């Protein structure tokens, strides 16, 4: 048990690693104890309030549970009761429902499942076998009665799924000490498991490369944020969705911790996205300036001063720009900007969906996977952050129409107005750019016509010590270089793609607002908000894909 925790810590030295445990008697308590001894924080997720959960423990085990819950490194969350029964002697079917809900939350809120398991199938809802199989996606309600489990070795270069389980084969009767040292059962050593088909699992003796890459990328992200904040004596406060909420929007106290976790990660991702965007924009502007300077130096040498000094300047600009490119290319500022922006926009949507009590209707990780963006090199870690901010389903029913109206104003109308402003601004900018390009093109045409009109006479007329022909040819070349440099800059900034994305987002938010204004049923209004969340997420991912492909080759194997 301690071996895998130490391995994860080695991959995530600059990141917070939290262990989520259901705190059931036996393996769960062992995992929590081991994690605390190694210095890890623990999220204790109880399937029901503690006073009801006590019925599943003997006196000694319950004392251990209470002692662990009192540890300062333990953060306890209780899933609410789902039945009217309030006593510990609730019917077995009701208790099974609570454990099933716990399994569902572990499936959604866990990046890597660590299972102390005997490898045997069990139909027990919320049991170890049920949790492992559902987490790997090889058991659903349709095949839960299937009593077999098939193990196999993966084929060479097999494309493994994202969800993995670290399995420590442990017999039910093994002691805590045996379980912690990973004593094998029938020669089976601890390994990773991946899903294959119905109750079919693949065994992997070592951590898959994809998981290693994701963990390394996640740690780089956290390290970058630490560096960003330490650069300032007083770090600039990150943007906060929570602090910008209107006082009229009532937030359930039960939801405050979940919303704060999302908001913290949003502020972090948004700050890094802005930071890397500035760096990449400056880099694009620098290369645009370099291209213009090289063209200007060549034109000057060709038409005015045939001196070696200009050739030397041209060579210096060329070699220095190549050196700067190779020096800064490895920083991956542009790709990091896209990663952090995709994460920030996803967290924004999750925050408001949680406020509307419909976050369980939208699986952001699933939308991310459907877009294919998590297959891009360096993007896979985003899913781990999203999993880390998952929260249990809200215990209350959807709020009144007034609450949904407040969410409408805080998110939908706010975003709609934002996209209205952005579309108008980008449209004005595109119109100005269009007229500038036309003007430059017109100057080039005019110069060509003047040269054709004057013919050989142009070479005889002098302008500031040079012939009119050379001056006009220089002007024509300068306009062409300016036009090319401007087009290069516009291509790098992808203003047209950004305008396209903003217009599409504006359509989504405008449509949702119009639908909500004409819909009264609370359930139907939640569906409209959930649909908007999915559409907005996919729009952000599609834009990211277009921007990424503009600068990089299509992704290979991640």
Image: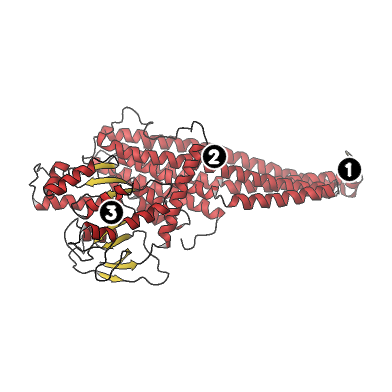
Q: Which residue is mark 3?
A: 107
Query: In the rendered image of this protein, does residue 498 appear above or below residue 117?
Result: above
Quick one: which residue is furthest to the top in this view? Answer: 247
- Element marked by disc 1: strand
Screen quadrant of the N terminus: bottom left
Number of the label disc, if any, that sits on residue 285: none
Q: Secondary structure at mark 3?
A: helix
Q: Residue at point 36% right, 34% down?
A: 242
Residue occupying the far front of the picture: 177
Residue nearer the viewer, 203 or 40: 40
Seen at 59% across and 52% down, the residue is 329
Circle 1 residue: 466
Which x, y percent locates residue 243? 38, 31
Q: Dot 2, crowdedness within 10 Å: few (<14), some or many (≥20)?
A: some
Rendered location of residue 96, percent (x, y): 14, 53
Indicate which label's residue lies in the foreground, 2 or 3: 3
Q: Nearer the viewer, mark 3 or mark 1?
A: 3
Label 2 and label 3: CA atoms lie apart by 42 Å
Residue 448 appears in the figure: no
Q: Secondary structure at mark 2?
A: helix
Going from the N terminus, do you reach mark 3 or mark 1 first? 3
Question: Residue at left 19%, top 57%?
Answer: 127
Instruction: Name the residue that disc number 2 marks.
Output: 426
How much space separates mark 1 and mark 2, taking CA atoms?
42 Å
- The structure residue drawn at horizontal position 21% and vertical position 50%, both measured from the top left corner, is 101
Query: 158 or 529, which is in the foreground?
Result: 158
Q: Position of residue 431 (x, y in %)?
A: 59, 40
């Amino acid at each position: 048990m301690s071996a895998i925790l130490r391995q994860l810590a080695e991959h995530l030295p600059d990141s917070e690693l939290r262990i989520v445990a259901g705190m059931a008697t036996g393996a769960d308590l062992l995992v929590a104890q081991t994690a605390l001894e190694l210095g890890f924080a623990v999220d204790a997720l109880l399937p029901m309030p503690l006073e009801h959960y006590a019925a599943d423990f003997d006196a000694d085990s319950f004392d251990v549970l209470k002692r662990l819950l009192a540890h300062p490194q333990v953060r306890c969350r209780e899933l609410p009761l789902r039945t009217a029964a309030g006593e510990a002697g609730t019917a077995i079917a009701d208790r099974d429902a609570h454990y099933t809900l716990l399994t569902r939350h572990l499936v959604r809120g866990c990046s890597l499942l660590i299972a102390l398991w005997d490898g045997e199938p069990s139909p027990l809802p919320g049991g170890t076998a049920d949790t492992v199989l559902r987490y790997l996606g090889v058991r659903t309600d349709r095949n839960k009665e299937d009593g077999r489990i098939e193990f196999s070795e993966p084929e060479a270069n097999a494309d493994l799924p994202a969800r993995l389980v670290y399995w420590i084969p442990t017999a039910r009767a093994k002691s805590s000490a045996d379980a912690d040292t990973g004593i094998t059962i029938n020669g089976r050593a601890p390994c990773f498991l991946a899903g294959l088909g119905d109750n079919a699992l693949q065994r992997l003796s070592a951590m898959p490369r994809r998981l290693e890459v994701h963990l390394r990328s996640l740690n780089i992200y956290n390290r970058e944020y630490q560096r960003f904040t330490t650069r300032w004596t007083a770090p600039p406060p990150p943007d906060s969705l929570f602090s910008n909420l209107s006082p009229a929007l009532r937030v359930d106290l039960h939801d405050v911790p979940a919303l704060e976790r999302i908001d913290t990660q949003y502020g972090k991702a948004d700050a890094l996205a802005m930071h890397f965007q500035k760096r990449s924009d400056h880099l694009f502007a620098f290369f645009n300036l370099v291209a213009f300077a090289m063209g200007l130096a060549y034109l000057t040498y060709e038409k005015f001063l045939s001196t070696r000094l200009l050739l030397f300047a041209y060579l210096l600009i060329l070699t220095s720009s190549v050196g700067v490119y190779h020096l800064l290319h490895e920083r991956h500022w542009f790709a990091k900007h896209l990663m952090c922006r995709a994460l920030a926009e996803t967290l924004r949507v999750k925050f408001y969906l949680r406020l509307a009590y419909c976050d369980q209707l939208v699986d952001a990780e699933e939308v991310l996977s459907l877009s294919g963006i998590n297959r891009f090199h360096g993007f896979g870690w985003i899913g781990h952050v999203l999993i880390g901010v998952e929260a249990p389903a809200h215990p209350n029913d959807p709020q009144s129409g007034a609450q949904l109206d407040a969410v409408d104003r805080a998110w939908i109308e706010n975003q709609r107005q934002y996209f209205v402003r952005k579309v108008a601004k980008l449209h004005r900018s595109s119109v100005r750019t269009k007229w500038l390009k036309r003007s430059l093109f017109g100057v080039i045409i005019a110069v060509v016509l003047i040269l054709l009109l004057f013919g050989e006479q142009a070479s005889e007329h002098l302008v500031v010590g040079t012939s009119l022909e050379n001056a006009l040819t220089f002007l024509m070349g300068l306009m062409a270089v300016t036009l090319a440099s401007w087009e290069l800059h516009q291509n790098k900034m992808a203003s047209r793609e950004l305008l396209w994305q903003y217009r599409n987002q504006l359509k989504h938010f405008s449509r949702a607002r119009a639908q909500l204004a004409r819909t009264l049923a609370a359930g139907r209004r939640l569906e409209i908000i959930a649909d908007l969340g999915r559409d907005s997420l996919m729009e952000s991912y599609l834009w990211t894909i277009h921007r990424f492909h503009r600068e990089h080759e299509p992704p290979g194997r991640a």
